[in-house]
Amino acid sequence: MKKYNPTSPSQRQRVSVNYREVLSGVKKPKKSLLKKVKASSGRNHHGRITVRHQGGGHKKRFRDVDLMQLKRKIPATVKTIEYDPYRSGFIALVCFADGEYRYMLAAEGMKVGDKVITDDKTVIKPGNRMKLVNIPIGQVVHSVELRVNGGAKLARSAGSGLEVLGSSDGFTDLKMPSKELRKVPSDCFASIGKVSNAEYNLINLGKAGRSRWLGIRPTVRGSAMNPVDHKYGGGEGAQPRGTKRPKDIWGNITGGRKTRDKKKWSKKFIVKRRPTVRGGKK
């Protein structure tokens, strides 16, 4: 992490990743793997806001990251480790033995020049990808599939990783970052190691403007709104909540209410729910 001299109020608190130490110094991404994505600013096809606090931000281009990784048994060489404006972890540009270039999620510890491969069973090395049934107990994995050849779905953000607890009856038990235990088909693929940029959660932007550059708009407190805009709005000065249970802007209960669908198809694969947090303690 990189700290800054307090030359201004915004620099005093700022903490950022030292990109010079972790990235390979590439100035431009691979042009053939770039896409132009129109910014929605949190609005649907009617132009109405469906996701609040989004909009603006610096112009950026989408990197076509290969989350399927269906190219098996062909070794690849890591050419660069790059920043991706659309995700918290870093990405790696790899060149396969047949000359094809692709982007993939960079694992923690991956360096330029490393060899990676996707196969049913291969060497335990950061970035290598194999079936869960062939991964030893206790190993940390990321980019885990939920269905065979369905592409990476679990553990894709910076520093994320799942612990392999064992395999039986065609399923592999995984321990999620939330301590939840979940079954995944053993023939699904997973990448070895954690996702790169594990110190992402320590970043302090330092000022509101830097948050706006990232496309994040301000969040207004409900108690500062009018009654027509929020359940907590209105009153003279600071007022109590005025409702029996905490609610969001639409009046839905937010505190102490279970949000997981009881009839969701994946419920049968959850061995143990995450621990309940009460009063700030587990």
Image: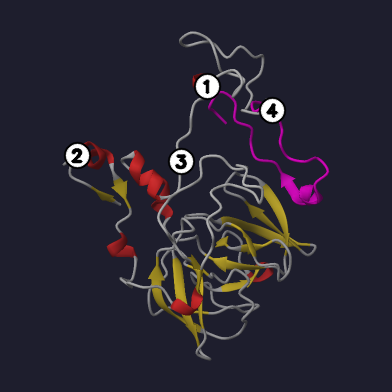
Answer with mark 2 or mark 4, whichever residue precedes in sequence.
2
Query: Gap between marks 3 and 4, in whole Å?
Result: 23 Å
Answer with mark 3 or mark 4, whichever residue precedes in sequence.
3
Q: The disc labelled 2 sits on which kind of residue?
A: Ser
Answer with mark 2 or mark 1, whichever residue precedes in sequence.
2
Name which residue lies at 61% across and 11% down.
Answer: 242
How packed is label 1: few (under 14 Cα within 10 Å), some, or many (20 or more)? some
Between disc 3 and disc 4, the foreground one is: 3
**Which dot marks residue 225?**
1
Q: The disc labelled 4 sits on which kind of residue?
A: Asn
How packed is label 2: few (under 14 Cα within 10 Å), some, or many (20 or more)? few
Vertical position of residue 201 compared to residue 26: above or below: above
Query: Gap between marks 2 and 1, in whole Å?
Result: 32 Å
**Which dot marks residue 252?**
4
Q: Secondary structure at mark 2?
A: loop
Name which residue lies at 48% across and 29% down.
Answer: 220
Mark 3 lies on residue: 217
Vertical position of residue 61 compared to residue 16: above or below: below
Q: Nearer the viewer, residue 199 or 243?
A: 243
Magenta stretch bounds: 253-282
Q: Provide the major secondary structure of the magenta segment.
A: loop
